[in-house]
Image: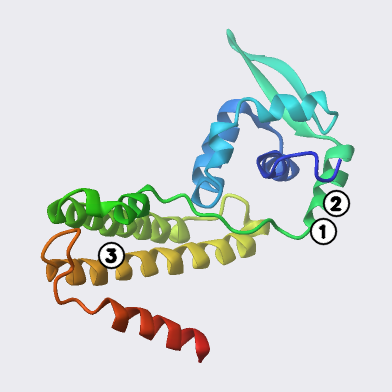
Amino acid sequence: MAGTRTTTAYAILGLLSIREWTSYDLAKQVRRSLNWFWPRAERRLYEEPKRLAEAGLATAHREKTGRRARTVYRITEAGRDALRSWLSEPPAPRTVEFEGMVKVFFADTGTKEQLLTTLDHIARESQERLTALAQMAGEPATFPHRAHLGALGLQLQHEQEQAVRRWAGWAREQVESWTAADDPGHWDTRAVLAELSSRHRS
């Protein structure tokens, strides 16, 4: 089992280890929790539980609510064993998907105004995410016995969003002084890189 499943599969198993879910409720919980640090889970949400059931790591049973049928997924003992085994494995290297930074990286093919607009959007989005995180922190825990783990994750997300917002403000100030997106004018690139290098050495 170990090494044959994706991280998304184990993430769904993790949610199933908390309680049983319908596909609809599972989707809502993924958007509320996993999407902050593993957005791929939502993209695979309707395939992965079926695969887990086919592999004997979860069960799926149909039930009716009024006229509507729904599928309810529940973890099996084999699924719990697989999840525990996966927790012992070292995590894969961290990855980040951040389209705004892709646009920054290739900004020299566009205009300075386009770059500034991208930076403004990044700053605005990080502020919106900080607001959402604060709201989540102030709400009663959905699963009180797991609130300590949620608090760890919220703290990291908050610090990351603060860093992004801070960086976007700093980057905007720098770009304002540039002649164009492909010409930083008198801006001292070497000084910025030297400062970063000295921080690493210290």
Tell me the amino acid under the disc marked 2.
Ser
Marks 1,2: beta carbons within 8 A: yes
Q: Residue furthest bottom?
A: 202
Identify the secondary structure beneath mark 1: loop
Marking on residue 88: 1
The mark total stands at 3
180 and 147: which one is in front?
Answer: 180
Distance from the alpha carbon under mark 3 to that under mark 2: 40 Å
Instruction: Give residue 85's mark.
Output: 2
User: What's the mark number on residue 23?
Assistant: none
Spatial separation of the CA atoms under disc 3 and disc 1: 37 Å
The disc label shown at residue 168, or none: 3
Q: Is residue 48 above or below residue 175?
A: above
The kind of secondary structure element at disc 2 is helix
Eye-nearest disc, 3 or 2: 3
Q: Residue at x 65, y 25 (%)?
A: 47
Q: In the displayed structure, does residue 168 sit left or right of residue 3?
A: left
Q: Residue furthest top?
A: 67
Residue 129 or 171: which is nearer the viewer?
171
**8 or 22, which is in the foreground?**
8
For mark 3, give the secondary structure: helix
Q: Amino acid at mark 1?
A: Ser
Q: Position of residue 15 (x, y in %)?
A: 68, 43
